[in-house]
Image (tube, rainbow, N blue to C red):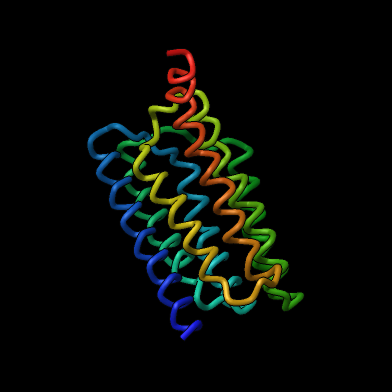
Amino acid sequence: MYSDNLNILGIVAGLLSMVSFIVYYISIFRRKTIPNKTTWFILTIVGILIASSYYAVGARETIWVPIVYIIGPFITFILSLKFGQGGWSSFDKICLILSIVSIIVWMISGYPLLTLLINIFIDLLGILPTVRKTYLNPNSEDLLTWLLVVIESILNLFAIREWVFGIYVYPVYMLVFNGLILFLILLPKLKNMLKG
């Protein structure tokens, strides 16, 4: 029964992740959100590596969100080619090279956890342009999307069966950085509430 509940939470988190991407796409089409091309390309590549290495370290109930984080970022990247901003800096190229290095490390060492950690770091580097953009222009990201993403991240934490580092590191990372972006979107509203 407990195992079934964890599976359900993991699936619900994955479905909510899909919904958050759909809301994000609508926001892009309405030109309320301006996706960063580089971020979403890097997140697509890294998503593939994270999902495969995360599965290899034993994640099962919480694997649905990483699977969605392959498809969702890829579609966002495609949309960013028309509706987005950003180019390819040296920093972006370094992130891609690190992704390739992580594949080689996994192939040589046979340690998927090391690959997972390298790609979480690369994911972090990939999301930093969006964090910066959101800090400078909070209206460039969609509030509802990021609210859903934070809720999905919380649900995914509750779906964890074993609190082993290799299993919980990715969901914790997701909650922290998705929460940061949500906070940056809300910050001007919070400042206005405190003033008024």
Image quarter hosting the C terminus = top left
- Using the image, determine if residue 5 lies above or below residue 31: below
Residue at x 65% of width, y 65% of height: 116
- Using the image, determine if residue 147 lies above or below residue 100: above
Q: Give the residue at the far bottom of this rendering.
A: 1
Q: Nearer the viewer, residue 96 or 26?
A: 26
- Using the image, determine if residue 176 lies above or below residue 46: above
Residue 130 in the image: state x and y as whole percent.
50, 37
Q: Nearer the viewer, residue 193 or 86?
A: 193
Residue at x 56% of width, y 71% of height: 160
| Tally of marks | 0
Residue 138 in the image: state x and y as whole percent.
44, 27
The image quarter containing residue 107 is: bottom right
The image quarter containing residue 89 is: top right
Residue 56 in the image: state x and y as whole percent.
61, 78
- In the figure, is residue 106 to the left or right of 48? right
- In the figure, is residue 59 to the left or right of 102? left
Residue at x 25% of width, y 44% of height: 26
Q: Give the residue at the far right of this rendering.
A: 109
Q: Give the residue at the far top of this rendering.
A: 195
Residue at x 43% of width, y 70% of height: 9
